[in-house]
Image (spheres, grey):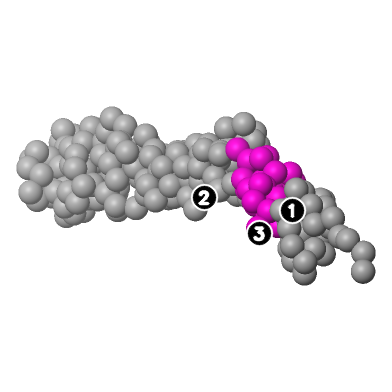
Amino acid sequence: GGCVDIQRNTSHCGGCGRVCNPPNGAPACILGRCGVATCAAPWGDCNADSTDGCETDTRGDVRNCGACGNSCPVRAGALSLCALGRCEYRCAPGYADCDGSASNGCEVQLGSDPAHCGACGNTCALAGATAACNSGRCTVLSCGSGRANCNNLGDDGCEADLTTDGRNCGQCGNVCPLRPNANAACAGARCAFTCLQGWGDCDGDPANGCETSLNSDPARCGACVNRCQVPNASAACTMGRCAIATCATGFGDCDGNAANGCETDL
């Protein structure tokens, strides 16, 4: 038969039988209205609304991390996180924290930064080229003078030297033609050829290559301008050296020296 103070009694708050039972916290009855006395860790009454009690789990709420009102900062290129009541951040896809500084977040775009292409520290350095980073892969931005990216691959840069490459002479795909008795070559971005040993381009016509055998032609023996002339004899050319074919009648090569021809009057 006693009287109850319905202004402060949590079992009869504001009226008989009105029980205060806030979620995740200890109840309070203040002037006949249910409220929260204390919250059970890690919960908090961050919206100051007694009807839903301690509604916030401060272990994982980025706006109330560790305590009500503690909002995790926004970082560049990153997603803010609250882990066990501590603010953290995770890089967004395609971004990375390459300098390790939280103040600037994930400052690098791995898809386009040639100093960190696809991964931190992966610097694009391509032979003969100015490099770029495209979708996380090193590519050629521009080629240096006399160089070209003839295979259209990014990882080996501008691989072709247009001044010396016989398959890409002066421009990609310009293959220097093979000439008879010669090796194809590219010099100064123009096609050329070098004669095989024992052959010469004595007529100056590139179409027929090195047409002259310098090993056997007495008119061009060892060199295009070397005509064999031996006294008292018909000349021959053997392995690029002048020799005697036959002596004139009445003469002989008695000293065996082709240089003075058939020196002896028989």
Q: Give the range drawn in magenta.
A: 45-73
Helix, strand, or loop for circle 1?
A: loop
Return the mark for residue 32: 1
Q: How far apart are marks 1 and 2 (CA)?
A: 50 Å
- Mark nearer the N terminus (2 vs 3): 3
Extreme-front residue of the structure: 1
Is the Cβ of the residue at disc 2 closer than 8 Å to that at disc 3? Answer: no
Q: Nearer the viewer, residue 7 or 121?
A: 7
What residue is rendered at 38% in x and 40% in y?
A: 132
The residue carrying pointer 1 sits among few (fewer than 14), some (14 to 19) or many (20 or more) residues within 10 Å by Cα, namely some
Q: Which of 178 and 61 is in front in this view?
A: 61
Q: Which of marks 3 and 1 is in front?
A: 1
Q: Distance between the residues labelled 3 and 1?
A: 17 Å
User: 150 left or right of 40?
Assistant: left
**Mark 2 — residue?**
92
For label 3, the crowd category at 10 Å Cα-Cα, with few meaning under 14, some 14 to 19 and many 20 or more, is some
Q: In which quarter of the image is the N terminus?
A: bottom right
Which label belongs to residue 52?
Answer: 3
| Residue positioned 66% across, 47% down in the render | 48
For the residues labelled 1 and 2, say whether their Cβ atoms are less than 8 Å apart. Answer: no
Q: Where is residue 46 in the image (x, y as percent from the top left)?
A: 67, 47
Examine the rendering and report whether any part of residue 255 can be seen.
no
Residue type, mark 3 in image: Asp
In the rendered image, residue 56 lying in the magenta stretch gets the answer: yes
Q: Give the structural element (helix, strand or loop) at label 2.
A: loop
Most extreme residue toward the right, as rendered?
2
Residue under the point 59% across and 41% down: 97
